Image (cartoon, helix red, strand yellow):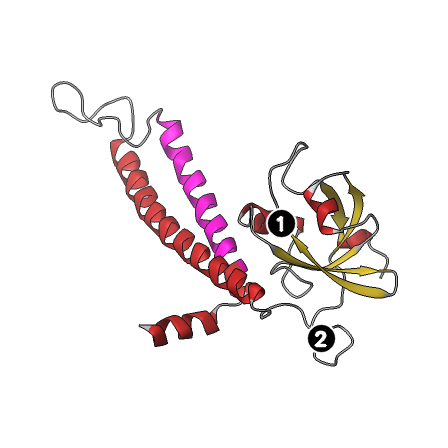
Amino acid sequence: MDEEKLEMRENVTRDSVLALVLQKEKIESEISQIKSVLDSNNVGMTEALVDDSGYPRQDLDVYQVRNARHKIICLMNDHKSIMLKIEQGLHILHGQQREGLGLPVDPTTAAVQHTEPIARVNFVASHSPAAEAGICEEDLIVEFGSVNASNIRSLQDIATVVRHSQDRSLSVVVRRHDKTVRLSLTPHVWTGRGLLGFNIIPVETVER
């Protein structure tokens, strides 16, 4: 059992967890699309599909509704399984961070993998989680948790990582002037909006 845990630990990377998160979002999107079938028939997951006499209801497409319900149940099971894997993966990653593993290497070494900025910070609220972490306006974000230039598709990827890391420390690498700074950011509820208290703009607007 210990060997299995060790193997699982070694196979978990920030990219692998992000891939699970993106897969989870795909499942959620599919569920939402299929639910539109139920909405168009004005039913949910539990209403009876037969009338008081035991005949199929005439006010809806019974076959279509049954098929949609079956697909949703299967997808919900997949969703539950993926959520468990994400939780386990995040737990392992946070353990690696506490032990000094899995963090970006010193950018002055030849082993550095990601130096390209993915976003720029253009606002940081006072007394926010971002301010507490030491993030400053005009910082160029190089890595945000598992998100970096090699895998980012949009800023939504960063938002996804934030949602799944509430009250857990994230490694954030920023480029500030001519220096690269590694920070520890913990998304959490505070007196302002959101879990971070800062605003970022897309990489397209970043001066590289």
Q: Which residues are magenta?
A: 18-41
- In the structure shown, which secondary structural element does the residue marked by tag 2 occupy? loop
Q: Dividing the image into 4 quarters, which one contains the N terminus?
A: bottom left
The answer to whether the residues at label 1 and label 2 have Cβ atoms under 8 Å apart is no
Q: Dividing the image into 4 quarters, which one contains the C terminus?
A: bottom right
Q: Residue at x 11, y 19 (%)?
A: 53
Q: Residue at x 34, y 73 (%)?
A: 2
Give the total of numbered labels. Answer: 2
In the displayed structure, 27 sits above or below 175; it is: above
Picture coordinates of residue 13, whole percent (x, y): 53, 67
As for residue 38 lying within the magenta part, the answer is: yes
* Res. 144 image quadrant: bottom right
In the displayed structure, 113 sits above or below 198; it is: below
**Residue density around tag 2, few if under 14, some if 14–19, many if 20 or more, within 10 Å:** few
- In the structure shown, which secondary structural element does the residue marked by tag 1 occupy? loop
As for residue 61 lying within the magenta part, the answer is: no
**Type of the residue with mark 1:** Thr
The span from disc 1 to disc 2 (Cα, nearest Å) is: 24 Å
Nearer the observer, 51 or 186: 186
Which residue is denoted by mark 2 in the rendering? 112
Which residue is denoted by mark 1 in the rendering? 186
* Res. 40 image quadrant: top left
Is 25 left or right of 152, judged from the image as shown? left
Q: Residue at x 70, y 79 (%)?
A: 111
Reading the chain from its start, which is encountered first: label 1 or label 2? 2
**Residue density around tag 1, few if under 14, some if 14–19, many if 20 or more, within 10 Å:** many
**Type of the residue with mark 2:** Val
